[in-house]
Amino acid sequence: MNYFIITGTSRGLGQAIAEQLISPEHYLFCISREKNNELLGKGKNIEYFEFDLNNVEHIEELMTTIISSIDTSSVKGIFLVNNAAVIAPVAFVDSCDVKDITTNITVNLLAPITLTSCFIRLTDEIDVNKRILNISSSSAKHLHPGMSLYSATKAGLDVFTQCVGLEQNTSAAPVKIVSIWPGMIDTTLQEEARSQSKASFPSAEIFSMVKERGMLTTPEETAAQIIDYLFKEDIENGEIIDIYDYSKINGLQP
Ligand SMILES: NC(=O)c1ccc[n+]([C@@H]2O[C@H](COP(=O)([O-])OP(=O)(O)OC[C@H]3O[C@@H](n4cnc5c(N)ncnc54)[C@H](OP(=O)(O)O)[C@@H]3O)[C@@H](O)[C@H]2O)c1
């Protein structure tokens, strides 16, 4: 049995990843604030945790519950997909309130860091294929005024991934960890970016144009590419992988 822990499965990319992983040989642990009943209706081996990743202090308890339920006599692989994220607040940093700043950094960076730490520690004695995919973004490099927090957290996630990759290269039962830039996907997160006022987010019109010109990929298309990286043999520990097909956007850098 392969076990998958996936965050942000109530919609968008996380839902598509979970849906495509449903199989009798796979057991899914899905995490988001809102339970996805549609997903639960599609398979038997799915357990849902309605959990707010802002509650970082309860992540260890959550991960202990999950990892201790794994049948170590039949486990083949254990996978963590840190997918959940928020784009808000999309505004110049001087007009962001402290609560929104804290939520962004907590969900996008502190939670995946804590989940990764617990995953590595709690699976230490289980010597099977272990992998962490951190869903990052090209926003770590391509910057827009109004997206400082989102970009900073994704850049932080990439550096964290690279450093943990180095640590795991010296481990007895190493975990493979990579960061993935999935490109622009037609999800709620994209909608949130393009629906901002031009005053608070001047790049909103770029995001609208990308949608109007059909340059977005579907969550299903991107999920299939991401799943390849769950099983791909030749990946370098700590690698940052950009899977977007830039020919779709004719040189635009969203
Ligand atoms: N869409 C794009 O163009 C794009 C581009 C580059 C990278 N990405 C990355 O792809 C990943 C998925 O994004 P998406 O586009 O699918 O976004 P989305 O449609 O907005 O979905 C975000 C998911 O994160 C979950 N989430 C948010 N806050 C949470 C919290 N406090 N606790 C638990 N779960 C929480 C949401 O569930 P609940 O609200 O139910 O909690 C939801 O399932 C993100 O890491 C994003 O940065 C997306």
Image: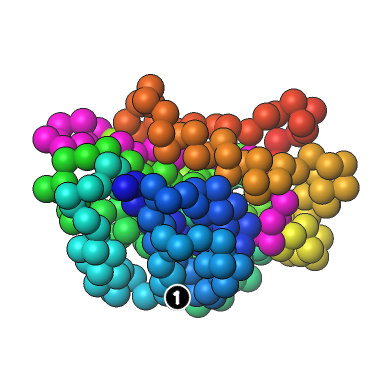
Q: Quadrant of ligand 1?
A: bottom right
Please give the residue where the numbered disc 1 appears in the rendered image.
Answer: 50
Q: Who is closer to the viewer here, 214 or 69?
A: 69
Residue 184 painted magenta: yes
Left or right, 173 with reference to 22: left
Q: Who is closer to the viewer here, 63 or 45?
A: 45
Give residue 15's position: percent from left, percent from top: 57, 58
Left or right, 63 with reference to 88: left
Q: Is residue 4 visible?
A: no
Query: As displayed, is residue 208 above or below residue 234?
Result: below
Q: Who is closer to the viewer here, 113 or 152?
A: 113
Kind of residue sitting beneath label 1: Glu
Residue farthest right in this picture: 212
Residue farthest top in this picture: 234
Image label count: 1
Image quarter where the C terminus lies is: top right
Mark 1: few/some/many CA within 10 Å (<14, 14-19, 20+): some
Q: Is residue 225 visible?
A: yes
Question: Where does the magenta region start and end?
Answer: 166-190
Give residue 66's position: percent from left, percent from top: 28, 64
Query: As displayed, is residue 87 above or below residue 4?
Result: below
- Element at label 1: strand
What residue do we see at 56% from left, 36% from top?
Answer: 225
Give residue 173's position: percent from left, percent from top: 16, 38
Residue 129 painted magenta: no
Residue 28: quadrant of the picture: bottom left
Left or right, 119 with reference to 198: left
Give residue 36's position: percent from left, percent from top: 56, 70
